[in-house]
Amino acid sequence: QVQLVESGGGLVQAGGSLRLSCAASGSVSSVNTMGWYREGPGKRRDLVSTITTDGHTNYADSVKGRFTISRDNAKNTVDMQMNNLQPEDTGVYYCRYLEARNRYWGQGTQVTVSS
């Protein structure tokens, strides 16, 4: 089992910034992919950004150039710096941990961007 604890959500005005953090604990594999997914109001949960243990990143087109994902493998943490936030970025952000056979989700953290 892997446990994920997220932090860093909140309310911000358009153009502002937030930083999300996710810490994994438990049976964390040395090879995994961690990342963030977003569930907007009335929408499905979609990929925002992911990063592998060897540093390969992936971003949704809508956040490229504004969000930056990073990780600390020694601490099993992943962060996502979100700049120039827009109202359409509003939603619940979920941390996800993925390894060969298992997938785990965090409890989610709310991000609200006001116009």
Image (cartoon, helix red, strand yellow):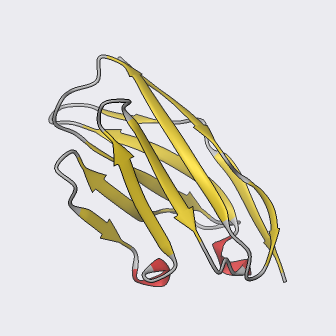
Residue found at x 73% / y 82%:
15
Above or below residue 94? Residue 114 is below
For the N terminus, give its image quadrant.
top left
Residue found at x 22% / y 39%:
32
Whole-percent x, y for residue 69 in the image: 41, 60
> Which residue occupies the foreground of this view, 73 or 92?
73
**On the image, which quarter does residue 30 sit in?**
top left
Above or below residue 49? Residue 106 is above
- 14 left or right, relative to 51: right
Q: How many marks?
A: 0
For the C terminus, give its image quadrant.
bottom right
Whole-percent x, y for residue 9 in the image: 70, 51
**On the image, which quarter does residue 88 sit in?**
bottom right
Residue found at x 38% / y 30%:
75
**On the image, which quarter does residue 18 sit in?**
bottom right
- 52 left or right, relative to 105: left
Above or below residue 6? Residue 92 is below
Residue found at x 48% / y 78%:
63
Whole-percent x, y for residue 54 in the image: 16, 50
Whole-percent x, y for residue 82 in the image: 58, 68
> Which residue occupies the foreground of this view, 9 or 88?
9
